[in-house]
Image: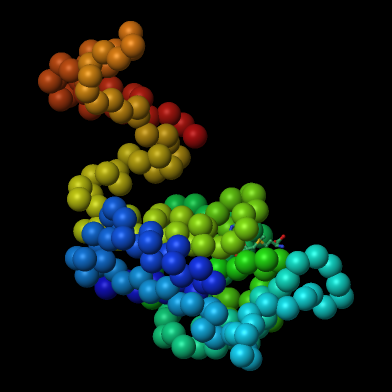
Amino acid sequence: MNLFNVITLFPNLIDEWKNTGIISQAIKNNIIEINSVNLRDYGTGSYKQVDDAPYGGGPGMVLMPEPLDNAINSTNVNINVFLTPSGAELDESLISELLEFESINLICGRYEGFDQRILDLHSDYEVSVGKSVVSGGEVPAMYLLEALIRRIPDVLGNPESLINETFTDNKVDYPVYTRPEKYKNLEVPDVLLSGNHQKIDEWKKNNLKDI
Ligand SMILES: C[S@@+](CC[C@H](N)C(=O)[O-])C[C@H]1O[C@@H](n2cnc3c(N)ncnc32)[C@H](O)[C@@H]1O
């Protein structure tokens, strides 16, 4: 069973998402476990403070090291993955690398991000989901988990879904169609309706595009 802990100030986002689609199915089938860890529970003082103004001035607040340190130390996992916009850009080869680990903490930033010392202490990977900045690490963490979890054996109903998928062998998947055969003057290619499996396979192969 693969274990994923998501350390976040917004555990409700993760808990809601956990109940959807293949993620909830994989949890029900005991293939994965996902826990949200509420960073606020590890805040300091009676206000459960988790952030403070940056040394040297500047806009926004910075996540303090101590609450994150305590939240991370409350878990027992193989690796800590921090979501940062400047991290290694996520792609299928990084997903393959991360799939080597059975238990992972995903640590979500907010505001101006993490005090550098928490990265120095605990970071095994910094991962970015793309060259744009969003307001928090939760959506990037869910994106990363969706990409990881669908590649764990037995998660997808049909494992063939992973074959020929976009990015496999630097190709873009062939176009797909469903009913009706004609929609607003646009028709499904004849070959897909022919029942000739050899021709259909050829068509699919010929319609994989290079990236
Ligand atoms: C507003 S961002 C902080 C940006 C930071 N000041 C900077 O310029 O690098 C707050 C948090 O959102 C998350 N985040 C934002 N964009 C991301 C991206 N492209 N990939 C992964 N995480 C991201 C990170 O966890 C980050 O700590």
Image quarter hosting the N terminus: bottom left
Q: Position of residue 211 (x, y in %)?
A: 49, 34
The residue positioned 27% from the left and 16% from the top of the image is 188
Quadrant of res 84: bottom right
Q: Nearer the viewer, residue 111 or 195?
A: 111
Question: Which residue extends farthest bottom?
Answer: 45
Tell which of 166 and 179 is nearer to you.
179
Furthest-top residue in this view = 185
Taking the view exactly as shown, the residue that stands out farthest to the front is 46
Query: In this rendering, is residue 88 above or below 63?
Result: above
Q: In the picture shown, does residue 109 fall above or below 190?
A: below
Seen at 65% across and 53% down, the residue is: 133
Q: x%, y% of residue 51?
A: 68, 77
Front residue of this view, candidates 64 and 172: 64
Residue under the image location 26 percent in, 13 percent down = 182
- Residue 207 screen position, x and y as percent: 36, 25
Q: Is residue 173 left or right of residue 62?
A: left
Question: Taking 186 as reference, is 70 above or below it?
Answer: below
Residue 189 seen anywhere in this rendered image of the structure: no
- Total residue callouts: 0
Is residue 179 shown above or below 4? above
Q: Nearer the viewer, residue 40 or 92?
A: 40
Res 32 quadrant in image: bottom left
Q: Is residue 40 left or right of residue 176?
A: right
Q: Quadrant of residue 189?
A: top left
Image coords of residue 199 (percent x, y): 20, 20
Q: Is residue 79 left or right of residue 44?
A: left
Name the side, left or right, on which 206 lies relative to 200.
right
